[in-house]
Amino acid sequence: MISFVDPLVTNYTVVDFRNRATALIEDIFARDKIPIVVGGTNYYIESLLWKVLINTKPQEMGTEEVIDRKVELEKEDGLVLHKRLRQVDPEMAAKLHPHDKRKVARSLQVFEETGISHSEFLHRQHAEEGGGPLGGPLKFSNPCILWLHADQAVLDERLDKRVDDMLAAGLLEELRDFHRRYNQENVSENSQDYQHGIFQSIGFKEFHEYLITEGKCTLETSNQLLKKGIEALKQVTKRYARKQNRWVKNRFLSRPGPSVPPVYGLEVSDVSKWKESVLEPALEIVQSFIQGRKPTATPIKMPYNEAENKRSYHMCNICDRIIIGDREWAAHIKSKSHLNQLKKRRRLDSDAVNTIESQSISPDHDKEPKEKGSPGQNDQELKCSI
């Protein structure tokens, strides 16, 4: 499934991908062959392995109509959407940040189309035989997962080189061609929100400023914008790779429940050892899998950390911020920005107390005769009381 969706299509979703890919997988099985899924985001791969998606589209509604409704919801203010979600699905609202409009809108869409809350759908999924805290049961029996991983420094270097190779292979011309095909007026007016369709892909928003000003500014400015876009593309690519690795660890390696296929790690940091570190172990694992015997390699398994996956709602009154997730909350209250705000708040509170207590002292206090005793004794006591 490569280059099978027109780049201008904006209503193709993970559900559409799952439906089409599942049909192909079942066809391969029917021909007594073994399907191999390679590449793509782990979220899409997970949708093929487990029952984790929700079908809500009514039979009389077309895909485009359903997508348009979600886009329509996303145009509303995030706080307004979140307030509406709290009314119909407080459990899901407690797990979602008001700024995460796409997920909030999706949960509202589920309720609008079915009359059943998103959280209730998930509870039913998890309660199915073979289900667990992260979703429903496996869709296919006896799958095997090979995970290629490398040291972070090595991976970062390769990703930077990958961007350079993409540029050398004509990335900019491909982007220019797309912008020529797209509604140039909308692009030039910065109306594209990069939330739907191909604009979500890494590479478009990073070069947006460069592309819409190309030929309209000085060569020096254009080169600076190009350099800025290249650096941004490299940074976002590395962040995305880290996110994908976290997904593997949290959703595959530490997945609880009975429906968890083995995940075999293959170290690819040193390509000079590709044969003995990657190729031969992979062949042995797959051959064992086909023959129904246990491979000599040991699958990777990590303990399930409920706190790592728990999405709890926290409100920081000091910073006036909403934090979703216990791990994120723990990090926030230790963060420099929070501690600075806390220090500032305490200083303001202290100043306010001093002001109030100072105002409560009689203006004629200093004119009253001092009691007998050591000089300044009463002044010192007053200072201590303040």
Image: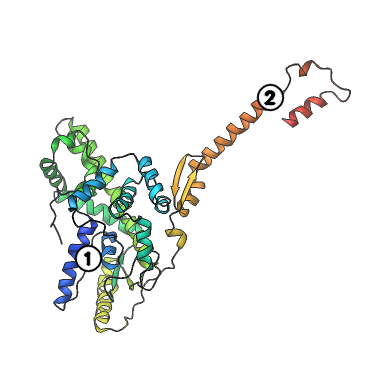
Give the Cα distance between marks 2 and 1: 72 Å
Q: Residues within 10 Å of mark 1 (few under 14, many from 20)?
A: few
- For discs 2 and 1, the disc positioned in front in the rendered view: 2
Residue closer to the observer: 21 or 174? 21
| Left or right: where 85 falls relative to 62 | right
Kindly identify the residue that appears in the image at 25 percent across and 45 percent down: 71
Figure check: 384 above or below 154: above
Residue at left offset 74%, top offset 20%: 362
Residue 191 point in image, percent of width and height: 22, 36
Between residues 12 and 68, which one lies in front from this camera angle?
68
In the foreground, 109 or 162: 109
**Which comes before the other along the chain, label 2 or label 1?**
1
| Near-viewer residue (160 or 191) | 191
Q: Element at badge 1?
A: loop
Query: At numbered mark 2, what does the secondary structure look like: helix, strand or loop?
Result: helix
* Left or right of 302 on screen, residue 367: right
The quarter of the image holding the C terminus is top right
Residue 143 x %, y %: 28, 74
**Quadrant of the image for the N terminus?**
bottom left
Q: Quadrant of residue 98?
A: top left
Name the residue located 22 percent from the left edge and 56 percent from the top edge: 58
Q: Is residue 8 above or below residue 296?
A: above
Would you name the residue on which mark 2 appears?
Answer: 358
Mark 1 is on which residue type? Val
Residue 338: x and y in percent read 50, 42
